[in-house]
Image (cartoon, rainbow, N blue to C red):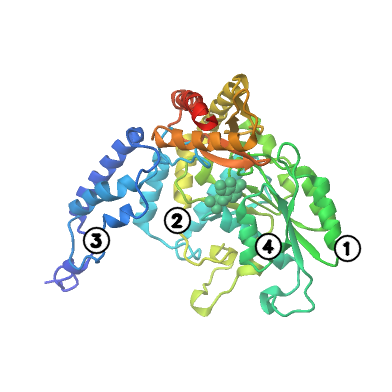
Amino acid sequence: MNRDQPHDLGGSELQDMDPETFRRYGHEVIDWITEYLRTPERYPVLARVQPGEVKAGLPEAYPEEPELMSQILEDFERVIMPGITHWNHPAFFAYFSITGSGPGILGELLAAALNVNGMLWKTSPAVTELEEVSLDWLRQMLGLPAHLRGIIMDTASMASMVAIAAAREAVDVDIRRRGMAGRDDLPTLCMYTSEQAHSSIEKGAIALGIGQENVRKISTDGEFRMDPRALQAAIEADRAAGRRPFFVAATIGTTSTTSIDPVPAIAEISGQYGLWLHVDGAYGGTAAIVPEMRYVLAGCDHAASIVVNPHKWLFTPIDCSAFYVRDPEILKRAFSLVPEYLKTGEDDVTNFMDWGVQLGRRFRALKLWMVMRYFGHAGLAARIRHHIELARAFAGWVDRTRDFERLAPAPFSTICFRTHPEGIDDEATLDRLNAALMDTVNSTGEIYISHTRLNGKFTLRLAIGNLRTDERYVGRAWELLQIEARRLVPEIVA
Ligand code: PLP
């Protein structure tokens, strides 16, 4: 008898799910996903559970004994599904609408099956090399310069924080070794971004000890774009006060309005003062895949770093954020720390653990690679173009309707608007009316939109980014908004 056979060692009971059970439930789960993705609109887009309801449906005590997969899957449908807000729903228009895709899901599945850790080149050479190749393909598709090198991060928030850390390292004030606390020799480091920038930029400053009060929120123009003259004035003021400007974050597609900061002018100022220019293109950057949208990345060839999110608007399941840097050596100076147990013999390889904080790394490149190959550049561009066209149509309806108004330009696929019925000009009433309108249409379960505040006004946002969204759903959203707005006016005004 071969004593090495796990079975003979009594191993089967101590091992994983057996292959035939895996196959059976694997097929079942793929069938379930297929039907779910065929018609996610059969669910209310916004989960209807009350806080605590999902928890209440689960036992407080952990499972002591093994349970059947069939039972676990039943509970998934019964307890978990009602607590899901359906980002796959074709009428999910809130925040930035995102979408996975068939090839992306299959990539995730294979990555989970391989379960490799790409911390070092050696720990799975294909993880590192596919990441390098797929990010270079994406760079080419976006028309970004060849000197940029990419790494996949979990989120744009993490990428921007790493960019700030690299910029801080580039200042050469020995923070890596000596820290920032209790140092009389250390100038106050200041960074700059617009008042419309995503909160992740400020969070990065919090995490890295820059301090919120050293983040200058530069004012924006009438179209919510950073004002370069205000930027320059803020830098000058900090320099005159003995502080040390070091980092500027420009945004392509700000979160509230999707405005595009004037990156060429900002790059010139950053260059003049020797500041690290980071471009946050988390949402808007991927639009440059469409040849006629390439203009949105103008000026990025001067950036020290740029982030775009395939998990937002490039059909790649969350999470997958593409972070590009001009000089990876600075990332390594900031982060590389190689203990004996992680040393390997190769010289000419990339060990991505050296480029940031995390050691263990998922095989995220696989899904991105599959998405890019399956759709091709042409297919990706056509889909993003379609979303932009749908948004243009919606913006046109708003513009042409007397009781509605647009509150910001819509360069991508997100529209900021509100209802403003004739004869109602009190801003507090309009705020109440629009907040009620959002809650009402969202409570139908048919659509999901979100809001922001622009120039003090409660603003509705409709964002298009899902592969299942088409004219019918955008048209229905518009119809519902008009019907409910008309119905609510007497209620709110009374
Ligand atoms: N930057 C911008 C402009 C965003 O709109 C967002 C999220 O919507 C982020 C950064 C944060 O993205 P992530 O969730 O990948 O951290």
**Marks 1, 3: nearer the viewer:** 3
Q: Which structural element holds mark 1?
A: helix
Q: Are marks 1 and 3 in contact (CB under 8 Å)?
A: no
**Marks 4, 1: nearer the viewer:** 4
Question: 10 Å neighbourhood of mark 2: few (<14), some, or many (≥20)?
Answer: many
Q: Which structural element holds mark 4?
A: helix
Query: In this orientation, does residue 6 appear?
Result: no
Q: Which structural element holds mark 2?
A: loop
Q: Position of residue 397 (x, y in %)?
A: 57, 21
Which dot marks residue 313? Answer: none
Q: Are marks 3 and 2 in contact (CB under 8 Å)?
A: no
**Marks 3, 2: nearer the viewer:** 3
Residue that carries the numbered disc 1 in the rendered image:
240
Residue that carries the numbered disc 4 in the rendered image:
212
Q: Position of residue 119 (x, y in %)?
A: 49, 65
Tell me the distance, in whole angstroms, between the alpha carbons under discs 4 and 2: 34 Å
**Residue type, numbered disc 3:** Pro
The residue nearer to you, when weighing 106 against 66, is 66
Tell me the distance, in whole angstroms, between the alpha carbons under discs 2 and 1: 47 Å
Tell me the distance, in whole angstroms, between the alpha carbons under discs 3 and 2: 33 Å
Above or below, 166 against 466 in this view is below
Instruction: Residue at 58%, 68% (x, y): give it.
Output: 347
Tell me the distance, in whole angstroms, between the alpha carbons under discs 4 and 1: 20 Å
Above or below, 238 against 50 in this view is below
Q: Position of residue 169 (x, y in %)?
A: 70, 67
Of callouts 3 and 2, the N-terminal one:
3
Task: Left or right? Give the position of 299 relative to 378.
Answer: right
Residue that carries the numbered disc 3 in the rendered image:
59
Query: In this orientation, does residue 420 appear?
Result: yes
**Residue type, numbered disc 4:** Gln
Tell me the distance, in whole angstroms, between the alpha carbons under discs 1 and 3: 62 Å
Instruction: Residue at 69%, 35% (x, y): give it.
Output: 295
